[in-house]
Amino acid sequence: MNASSLKARFLLLGFLVALIAKFWLIWESEIADALDDPHEYLLQILYPANGGLAYPPGTGLVGQLFYNLGIPFRLGLETAFLLAAALIIRALIAWPWKSGLSLGLFVLLIFDPSVAELFSHLYSDNVWLVETMLGLSCFILAIGIGPKPRWSLLILSVLFLGLSTITRSVLVPLLVSIILFALLALVLVLSKFRSKSLKSHLDLVALSVPTLIFSISMIYAGTSIYNFSHHGYSGISYLDSAQYKKFYLCLQSVGDPTGDPYFPIDENRRKLIAQAGPDSHWFIEQLESNSVYKQAGLDHYGKYDIPAGWFHWAAFTAAMDPAKGNYLDAFSLFHNIEDEIDAANQMGIVKVRPIASLPDSRIPIVMSVFPEGLHEVVSKTIYEPPLDAFITVEGKLLYTNPEFTKGLTRRIVTESPTRNHVWLFLDHLYSWIYTPATFILYVATLFAFIITLISKWKQLPEFPISLIAPLFFTIIFIIFFFWYALFDASGMPVLPRYMIFNHLLLFPLICSYLSIAFRLLKRSSDN
């Protein structure tokens, strides 16, 4: 047996051992909480036809698929995540069982405690993460291998990315990223206008990118049309609809600016709104009687009031019965409140001011991105969960509703002390791996990659197809990074789970930059 064959078997064995170890860690783990109303979450997971309630329908569609197949929700997501991680590594470098570097990155990704902690909750974010990883990697594999798109992979990319846009509101940054990638790729390809592969590269971009953009947009538009015809709102969810945004801004227009972006509809403004009419008074009473969202303001911002990030949920809870999910009644109420505010303004009962589609204090919102917002997003990118995220009580994960647990997992969940200790060890290890120095290393390698590429570009006879993956994922990383920096500054809190995708891309991108830069330098020295 020669050395290469022995190495291949060793890598394959290491890959299989990593999979077995991962499944051992997650086999008896499931969703660890039933936040808010368990019935609401059951509807979201099992009955997306009900509108997905305040969430877009993507989470419910995936949950319904797992449920119909008899697969526990978390186990299904974790298995899909393993596939997605392997595809991401393949798109940037090589299959985990083909390269030692790829295997190391694969292990780094799948044992990350931040991912395990995210998957222990019933969020749309973990579903979106897996869908996005699968979709982006399939797109790169569809165009990054041959002179023509691999249509089967491109169709899968459309499916996964289309689902991601109706799972979380990411259509705009996703399309912006794809368009910027296409423009940059065209510029680089055209700069090698004398190469023999020019036409094939242009055809590749011209066929794949418009197909992806058009198909994703159609999935998003189809979902929006369905929601409007069945539930009375446009967009992919209640929160993203134009009707709700109009209502939200109407409430903000009452009274003077607060100057506080985190509490645009604070207690004082709500008192003014209640004076507009009977429906307004009833709606505000419902808001004031629910202390859950005020406590969220105290926990996150030190003020016992309803913050911007939770007001939408508070309005949803006040306006409609979660068990029925009747959006038509909710929007009818919102429309009546808008009419009452308009009439009260004309009669001089309340003062209404024109505002733009942003929370109060708009100039500081944009300015706060530099540097506070960016600094905040850096900390979220390297985030690791607290130690107590993996500590159970007497070896069991506790639930607030046994029927919810049964409906979601179909079994009683226990956790072994050994697994607890492993997760605690991994949490310590990863908190040492992911630090601010990691982000500085990423930025440094990115600049080194760009400088090397610029200096050696003229020596390349044609556009190297291996550049497609790092260029694409770099644009995705940067666009989402700045998108959430603005999101944080606008008064909607950036939770660590929003940045998990960027978090996972850090080391694969660093290794990809270094690998390509090394090959370019080696090629230059050989010549």
Image (spheres, grey):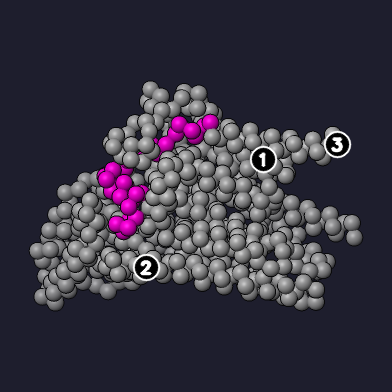
In the rendered image, residue 449, in percent from the top left (x then y), is placed at 71, 57
Q: Secondary structure at mark 1?
A: helix
Query: Which residue is drawn at the image coordinates 13% and 74% (left, top)?
Result: 343
Q: Which residue is mark 1?
A: 104
Farthest residue to the right: give it.
527
Q: Nearer the viewer, residue 43 or 396?
A: 43
Which portion, as a residue range, is magenta? 24-52
Marks 2 and 1 sit apart, C-alpha to C-alpha, by 42 Å
Q: Which residue is mark 2?
A: 224
Q: Which residue is mark 3?
A: 2
In the rendered image, residue 488, in percent from the top left (x then y), is placed at 42, 56
Residue 123 forms part of the magenta stretch: no
Amino acid under disc 3 = Asn
Amino acid under disc 2 = Ser
Q: Secondary structure at mark 3?
A: loop
In front: label 2 or label 1: 2
For the C terminus, the image quarter is bottom right
Q: Would residue 409 be found to the left or right of residue 522 on screen? A: left
Q: Secondary structure at mark 2?
A: helix
In the rendered image, residue 10, in percent from the top left (x then y), is placed at 74, 35
Q: Earlier in the sequence, mark 1 or mark 3?
A: 3
